[in-house]
C-alpha cells in the first residue's frame, strides 16, 4: 500500500510540475526581482545594485503616494460594489428564471466582449461620456446637463465596469446555478418569504462564488491602467499611473518597484481575507 501511495504521489507531482515551473518562472521569479530592485539605487540615470532603504523611506513618506493609494483603493472598491450589485439581478435571473440552454447562450454572449481589445472598448466610451455624447444628449432632451463625465472618477468607474462586469456576471451565475434547488424549495415549503429566502438561503449558499467574483473585480480594477488614464484623466493618478510617472522621472525604476510591491502586498492581503471569508465555516454555537 505504501509503494502504491508513493507511486500515486509521484504521478500527481508529475502533473503539478508544469504548473509549479510556470509559476516559478513567470510569477515568483519576477516578483522576487521586483522586490530586490526596490532596494537598488539610481545614479546618473543608471541602476546600481545595493541594499538601501532610501527608496522605501522616500516613497512611504510622500503624501502624494498615499493619496494615490487611497484613491485607487476607493475607486476600485466602488467599482467592485457597483459591479456586484449590478451583476446580481442578471445572474439571479440567469440562474433561476431561464432554461439551461438560454443560460449557456447568455454566458457565451458575456464572453464575446473579451474577444475585442479592452483599449478599443474603453475608447468607445468617449462617444458616450463626452459632453456632446449620447448620455448628455439624453439629459438634454429633458432639459438637464450637460454634465462632465470624462476625466472624472465616474469615467474611471465606468472603465472598470467595462473590464470586469461581464466576468462578475459569469462567476455569480455559476455560483447561483450550482445551488441545490431542494434547499430553496424546502425554505419556501416552510413558509419562508421570497426576500428572506434570498438573503437567508440563496446568498449564504452562493457566498463563496459571490466573494470570489468581487475579488476578481477588485484585483482587475486595482491594477488597471487604461480606464483611469483615458477615462479618468489620470488626475488624481492611480497607483499604476504613478508607477509610469515614476519611471519617467529620472528612470526611477526602484521607486516604481516600491509602489508595485505596495500594490502586491495590498492585493495579497485582500485576496487572503476574501478567501477566508468565502470558505470559513460558521461556528456550531
Image (spheres, grey):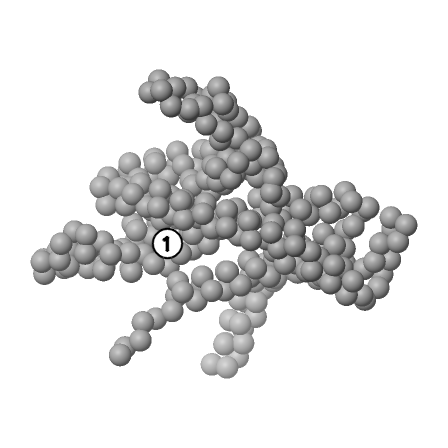
Is disc 1 surrounded by few (<14), some (14 to 19) or many (20+) residues within 10 Å? many
Judged from this view, the residue extending furthest toward the right is 44
Q: Tell me if I can see residue 23 in this picture.
A: no
Which quadrant of the figure has residue 54? bottom right
Q: Mark 1 points at which residue?
A: 210
- Is residue 197 shown above or below 124? below
Q: How many marks?
A: 1
What residue is rendered at 22% in x and 41% in y?
97
Residue at image position (48%, 19%) is 132
Residue beneath the point at 58% across and 48% down: 223
In the rendered image of this protein, does residue 73 appear above or below residue 164? below
Residue 50 location (% of width, % of height): 84, 64
Q: In this orientation, which residue lies closer to the viewer: 260 or 189?
A: 260
Dividing the picture into quadrants, the one containing residue 23 is bottom right
| Residue at disc 1, secondary structure | helix
Q: Nearer the viewer, residue 259 or 35?
A: 259
Q: Nearer the viewer, residue 154 or 217?
A: 154
Residue 195, compared with residue 129, is above or below; it is below
Question: Residue 169 vs residue 57: left or right?
Answer: left
Seen at 43% across and 41% down, the residue is 165
- 22 relative position to 269: left or right: right
- Residue 125 position within the rendered picture, expressed as x and y whole percent measured from the top left: 50, 28
Viewer-proximal residue among 111 and 261: 261
Looking at the image, residue 17 sits to the left or right of residue 187; the answer is right
Q: Whole-percent x and y of residue 278?
A: 39, 62
Q: In which quarter of the image is residue 203?
A: bottom left
Residue 184, horizontal then vertical, whole percent: 19, 56
Q: Which residue lies furthest to the bottom in this view?
A: 2
- Image quarter of the C terminus: bottom left
- Asked whether residue 131 appears in the rendered view, the answer is yes
Amino acid at each position: 500500500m505504501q509503494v502504491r501511495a508513493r507511486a500515486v504521489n509521484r504521478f500527481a507531482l508529475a502533473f503539478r510540475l508544469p504548473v509549479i515551473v510556470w509559476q516559478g518562472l513567470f510569477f515568483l521569479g519576477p516578483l522576487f526581482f521586483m522586490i530586490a530592485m526596490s532596494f537598488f539605487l539610481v545614479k546618473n540615470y543608471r541602476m546600481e545594485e545595493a541594499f538601501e532603504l532610501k527608496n522605501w523611506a522616500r516613497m512611504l513618506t510622500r503624501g502624494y503616494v498615499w493619496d494615490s493609494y487611497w484613491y485607487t483603493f476607493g475607486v476600485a472598491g466602488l467599482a467592485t460594489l457597483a459591479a456586484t450589485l449590478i451583476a446580481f439581478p442578471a445572474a439571479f435571473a440567469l440562474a433561476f428564471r431561464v432554461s439551461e440552454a438560454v443560460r449557456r447562450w447568455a454566458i457565451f454572449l458575456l464572453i464575446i466582449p473579451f474577444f475585442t481589445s479592452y483599449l478599443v472598448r474603453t475608447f468607445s466610451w468617449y462617444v458616450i461620456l463626452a459632453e456632446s455624447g449620447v448620455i448628455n444628449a439624453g439629459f438634454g432632451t429633458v432639459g438637464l446637463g450637460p454634465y462632465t463625465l470624462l476625466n472624472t472618477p465616474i469615467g474611471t468607474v465606468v472603465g472598470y465596469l467595462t473590464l470586469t462586469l461581464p466576468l462578475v456576471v459569469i462567476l455569480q451565475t455559476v455560483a447561483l446555478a450550482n445551488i441545490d434547488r431542494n434547499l430553496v424549495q424546502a425554505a419556501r415549503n416552510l413558509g419562508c418569504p421570497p426576500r428572506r429566502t434570498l438573503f437567508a438561503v440563496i446568498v449564504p449558499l452562493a457566498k463563496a462564488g459571490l466573494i470570489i467574483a468581487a475579488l476578481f473585480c477588485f484585483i482587475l480594477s486595482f491594477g488597471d491602467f487604461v480606464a483611469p488614464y483615458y477615462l479618468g484623466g489620470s488626475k488624481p493618478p492611480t497607483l499604476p499611473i504613478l508607477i509610469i510617472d515614476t519611471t519617467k522621472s529620472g528612470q526611477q525604476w526602484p521607486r516604481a518597484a516600491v509602489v508595485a510591491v505596495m500594490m502586491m502586498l495590498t492585493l495579497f492581503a485582500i485576496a487572503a481575507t476574501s478567501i477566508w471569508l468565502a470558505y470559513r465555516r460558521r461556528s456550531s454555537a
